[in-house]
Image: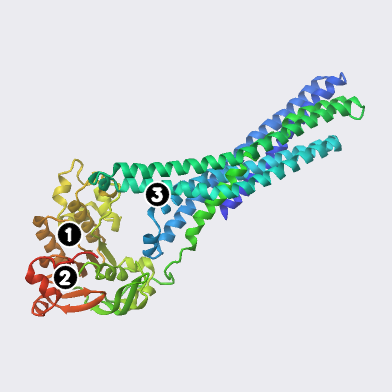
Amino acid sequence: MKEKGNLKKSIVVGFLNAIFNAFLVIALYVVLNAIIENSVSTMTAWTAFIIMVVSIAGKIITQYFSQLQRTHAGYFMVAGKRISIGQKLKSVPMGYFNQNSLGQITAIETTILNDVESAVPVVLVTTLGGFLNSFVFALFILGFDWRMGVVTLLGIAIFLIVTSAMEKKSREGVPARQEAQAALVETVLETIQGMSVVKAFDLDNNLDKKVDRAIEESFQKNEKLEKAMTPYVAMQQLVLYVFSIALMFCAIAFYLNGTMEITNSLIMVICSFMVYEQLKVAGSCVANMRIAEHSIDKANKIDDVPTMNEGGRDIVPKTTEIKFENVEFAYGKKKILDHVSITIPEKKLTAIVGPSGAGKSTLCSLIARFWDVDKGAVLVGGVNVKDYSLNSLMGNISMVFQNVYLFADTIENNIKFGRTEATHEEVVEAAKRACCHEFIMALPDGYDTMIGEGGASLSGGEKQRISIARALIKDAAIVIFDEATANVDPENEDRLQKAIEELTKDKTVIMIAHRLKTVRNAEKILVLNDGKIVQEGRHDELIKEAGIYADFVNSRKEAIGWKLGKQ
């Protein structure tokens, strides 16, 4: 709302700029009239000079404030929208990211909003400013001679008719152009992210063709839009040139037939060169206005994405016991969890094992409310997770994923991501517990070493341990490890295992794991299969039962067709 006010101010100031621009004609009139009447004096020069100074100073000041207001509006309007989208994406179900590619979201946050940022304020102010400038000149000309004023207004009217047709034509081509732009961003992003796969499987030619097609499609849509607009732009220019000539012709004709004084005739000839000048610029912006409008509509589509119920409140749970009460959950039509009822004890280690696709990661994600259950309830400390505000719920949970993402920042800042106010000593202590202190100190700048986006400069095991350190320093009451030791070498796994076991003294730890040594000391082991809890108990109990868990332990290897890993 504030930025709309800035745009309105910019338009008002633009109107004042048009008035000051018209003062130039008044100064010329004073000089011409004095010359023709042979009454030139010092007073004439000073009068014209003062009017010129007022005109120039007024134009400079109004142009400065108009540009300042529109630039501020453009940048802050788009900045606010980007922040709004970021906040929105925090509250949508994780399933949204499965159905909508990262490329589309990236295109909105970059290319599409860049169009809005650069085009909307300039196009809006330039277009309206051009019409206002011509309108002010038309009023000025009406004051001199109503006949000339009518010709001027007729030119503006015909120009508007052509512009309206141009706007309708642009409405047809702009959506396709925007879709092609978004597809290009998506393809380029996919190519960069999948470069390792491309190299490994020698898919360079196939991917090059896909990128080339996206570039060609974007080129064709942009070219098609430009070709469609060119005749209308030419028509706009033609109309304005024809009426400029008409004004000049009328001014001379009216003088020759004795119905217009020589001074007024000369001023009208001068005005014929000035009256439509700003309108020419405004007309060329109409197609860009349609692009900007479609960009805004595209960005606003994210607002229509359904969010999870955000009516929660800040809650400090009395306990960290977790309960699933008859929970059902499905991805679309595929049921993942089917009538699951379990209790995860407080301040103990609970391990979750089962075949790939059994629902292990989904079970953990429902605790953190990445999705909402279809039926039943998930309780933390006896309170439904839906009753928590998102911040208060996640304040009690730390998660370590198998696929670790690190930010393009220092190692220390990546570890401190969960608690930015942590001291360096606390960071080092967390790193030692996560078995990553030694390799960090071996790096050129130690904890100040910059790592590439996504942690590209580190190995999988190193990223995993930094991720664990990040979870440790957050010091949340509930810690969820999704295959925490999957990418850790055997030597460090033993040390890491000891650190994880220490957490059970005062944390509620949930671990998805695929190695026996990781889960054998768990207080409770949950065996998941086909979305149901098929076994539950301690290692010593489950090993004696016929079933999935015993088969795994006795075989000492993964069962055929599945592994105790992330689904």
Q: Nearer the viewer, mark 3 or mark 2?
A: 3
Image-quadrant location for residue 384 = bottom left
Name the foreground residue: 3 vs 212: 212
C-beta proximity under 8 Å, tags 1 and 3: no
Report x, y in % for residue 25. 76, 30
Dot placed on the residue nearer the N-terminal end, 1 or 3 = 3
Q: In this view, does 303 lie to the left or right of 411?
A: right
According to the image, label 1 marks what residue? Answer: 486
Kind of residue indicated by mark 1: Ala
Q: Check disc 2 and report the residue beneath it.
A: 505
Say left or right for 249 vs 450: right
Q: In this view, does 414 lie above or below 157?
A: below
* Mark 3 residue element: helix
Any mark on residue 70, and which? none
Inspect the image, locate mark 2, and give the three-letter code of the amino acid beneath it: Lys
Q: Name the residue under label 3.
A: 186
Mark 3 residue type: Glu
